[in-house]
Image (spheres, rainbow, N blue to C red):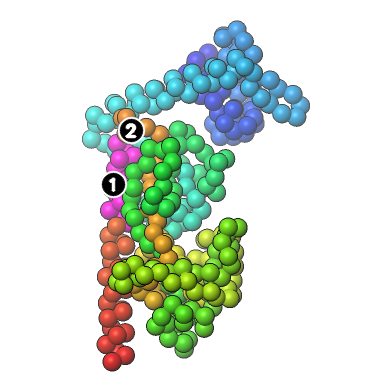
Amino acid sequence: MDKLQAMQIFRSVVDEGGFAAAARALNMSPAGVTRYMSDLESDVGARLLQRTTRKMSLTEAGEAYLDRVRHILDDVEDARAVVQAHTQEVAGVLRIVTSPLLAAHLLAPVVAGFRQLHPRVSFDVSVEVMGPRSTAVNDCDIKLLTAPTDFNANLIARPIITTVGVLCASPQYLQGRPPLLKPEDLRDHDCLTFRHPERRAGNIQLTNPDQDGVTVEVNVQPSFQVNHLDTILRATLDGAGISSQPLNLVAPYLNDGRLVRVLSPWSSGQLTLYAALPSRKFLPTRTQAFIEYLTERTRNSVHSAMVRATEQREAAQRKGR
């Protein structure tokens, strides 16, 4: 029996919630997983899992063993990273966990460019709704997440970029619509909003950095409410109305003209994109290379979008004189 592989299988059985799920995740047969678990329990001389027809749970011995197994496997990964850090070649599987919105509009657009630079890196991406049940940081290389700037969780997280929420719409939607000169003008437009259980529907709070951070609240009657951010962005791109979006996500669409920022420089809050990491020690070369690439691409895109918005605002002001 390969004890290291047996430990990896045991961890996967627990994390995936069963033998069949672990077999799929590891690309093994269920019989192979069962055999490894049986051999592992024989080797340690204790039952690690309590199995019934309805559920599976850890025994007391299994809980203690799993804790040590996780440390051992982390040390093995660190040892591999030490060796990789001493080579110039960037290679291996980059395991990333992120939300549907970040996966579609931030991660997917940079994969091709990164692999042109580092063709021996492959991606294994898990797209999940971020929450208490999402994949733990220790089980991946990078967990991409967006959080308020004062975010203070028990995570090792590198900030990629701090950005703002911007109001935007498609050129098709804006054509022939009433002008947007002040926040209150939003009441004359179709507004697409995110339905949040702790916020009043239709309440939009905006801040103007050019006016010493003055903040206003505008109450609108949303034409479209949904509790899924990607749906709002898709509807905005298709001309359904105006929505607030993180600048780092919509910067490519602002740069290529598919979206237009409105009411600049008003913004709807500040957010930071983070790359959460399992450890500060022995960061694999592929992980470091991707974080640097993503940071540069994102910051350049946001800078271009801000310059474009400023130019459009100044042109509108000159036209209105």
- Of the numbered discs 2 and 1, the one sitting upstream in the chain is 2
Which residue type does callout 1 highlight?
A: Glu
x and y percentages locating residue 12 in the rendered image:
55, 28
Q: Is residue 19 left or right of residue 167?
A: right
Estimate how packed mark 2 is, as few (under 14), some (14 to 19) or many (20 or more) residues with alpha carbons within 10 Å: few
The circle on residue 172 is: none
**Foreground residue among 216 and 35:** 216
Question: On the image, numbered disc 1 is attached to which residue?
Answer: 292
Residue 141's x, y, as percent? 40, 37
Please determine whether, in this image, residue 213 is positioned above or below residue 27: below
Question: In the image, is residue 177 above or below residue 138?
Answer: below
Quadrant that contains the C terminus: bottom left
Residue at 54% across / 78% down in the picture? Answer: 190
Span colored in magenta: 285-298
Image spot of residue 97 (x, y percent): 47, 43
> Is any atom of residue 273 visible in this view?
no
96 drawn magenta: no
Q: Which residue is mark 2?
A: 280
Residue depth check, mark 2 versus mark 1: number of the one nearer the observer = 2
Q: Position of residue 262 (x, y in %)?
A: 40, 76
Q: Is residue 295 magenta?
A: yes
Q: Is residue 290 left or right of residue 268?
A: left
Secondary structure at badge 2 equals: loop
Residue at screen point 44% across, 22% down: 71
